[in-house]
Each structure stands twice: as structure tokens, then as C-alpha cells.
Image: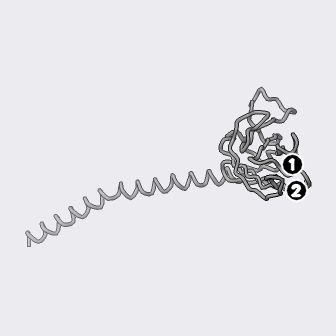
Amino acid sequence: MGISNALAGGIMLIAMVYVILGIPGLLEGNAAMSGALVQRSSADDETLKTSIDITALSLVAGNTVINVDLANDGTTKQWEYSKFTVIATYDANVTGSRVRTTEQLSYGGISSSPAAGQWVMYSFDPSTDSYVDPQVVNPGEQFVIRIRPQNAIYETNPSVHVAVSTPNGVVASMGGTF
């Protein structure tokens, strides 16, 4: 009887040690999952607070450049312009023919004249104090981007549609015939 008690006690001790050693692994997995949920919640919150709106589209420079006036209607600042996605669908002038073309344009920096296939930050809201946050679009501010597609835009009543997406996926779009 003494041997069976000792054997049962040894088995119970081994089982308790095994359970105690397994607890940190369970807690670590829960902590990693909790961290991922916090990051996801933060990203969702950022997306909910972000809002941009295209207020106007216009053609300039002999139908080679599109001006896009935007407003930051959300509560987040916008400054990572290289992470924006800009897509333009327009009637291109290809050897004198109207050809519907869609392009994703690359970011060309802060400038007044984009190269072909690029978009640039053209101007920031002049009514606000740019000394506080230079080259940052704060909530409520306006900004203008310029787009120069690869092809010239067809001259007679061209159709142009532009979509702009922020780094967290909030999209604004507008189109029209000029």
C-alpha cells in the first residue's frame, strides 16, 4: 500500500509540474492574440476617423493636366502622400482617336508640374497657418493634387474619373465630362 501511495503521489506531482510549465505558453498565446486585436481595433478606429472628399475636378495646361481639389473631412491628419493611391480613367488622345484609358499614377512629390504618369501635391490650404504643420493636411483643410496621365487627354468633351485612396483605404472619387 505504501508503494501505491508513493506512485500515485509521483504521478500527481509530474502532472502538476506539466500543467504549471504549460501555463506560460497559454498566456503568451493569449497576449499575442490580445496585441493583434488591439492593433486591429486601432486600425479600424483610424479608418473611421479618416474622410476625404473630392470637391472639384478641372483640366489645365491644354488638357494635359488634371487638377483635383480635395478636402480632409475627417479628424485625422494626412501626410503620408507617397502611400496614397491615385487612379485616373480618362478619354486619351491616342493618334487622334478617343481611347478610354485607366492608369494608376505614381507619386511625384510636392511640386507644381508632374511628369507623365505621375501625380503631385500641388497646393495646401492657404487659409490656415502652415507654420504649425507645414505640408500636412489637417482636419478641415483643403489641398490640390495635379495629375499628368501618360497620354494627352482627348480635347473634345473628354470624360475624366479620378479616385484617391488614403493609406488606410478610405476612398474619394469624382468624374465628369469637360
The extreme bottom residue here reads 1
The picture places residue 16, in percent across and down from the top left corner, at 26, 62
User: Mark 2 touching mark 1, by CB under 8 A?
Assistant: yes
Location of the N terminus (image quadrant):
bottom left
Is 71 rendered above or below residue 25? above
Where residue 68 appears, as percent x and y from the top left, is 83, 45
Q: Residue 89: where, in percent of width, then height?
A: 77, 55
80 sits to left or right of 32: right
Relative horizontal placement of residue 52, taking residue 177 as reference (left or right): left
Q: CA distance from mark 2 to mark 1?
A: 8 Å
| Image location (x, y in percent) of residue 154 | 85, 52
Residue 57's disc number: 1
Sort mark 2 into few (<14), some (14-19) or many (20+) by Cα contacts within 10 Å: some
Q: Residue at x 77, y 48 (%)?
A: 151
Indicate left or right for 97 with 136 as reference.
Answer: right
Q: Amino acid at mark 1?
A: Leu
- Give the answer, above or below, for where 77 lies relative to 169: above
Looking at the rendered structure, the secondary structure element under dot 2 is strand
Residue at the (32%, 59%) spot, across then down: 22
Give the residue pinned by disc 2.
Answer: 176
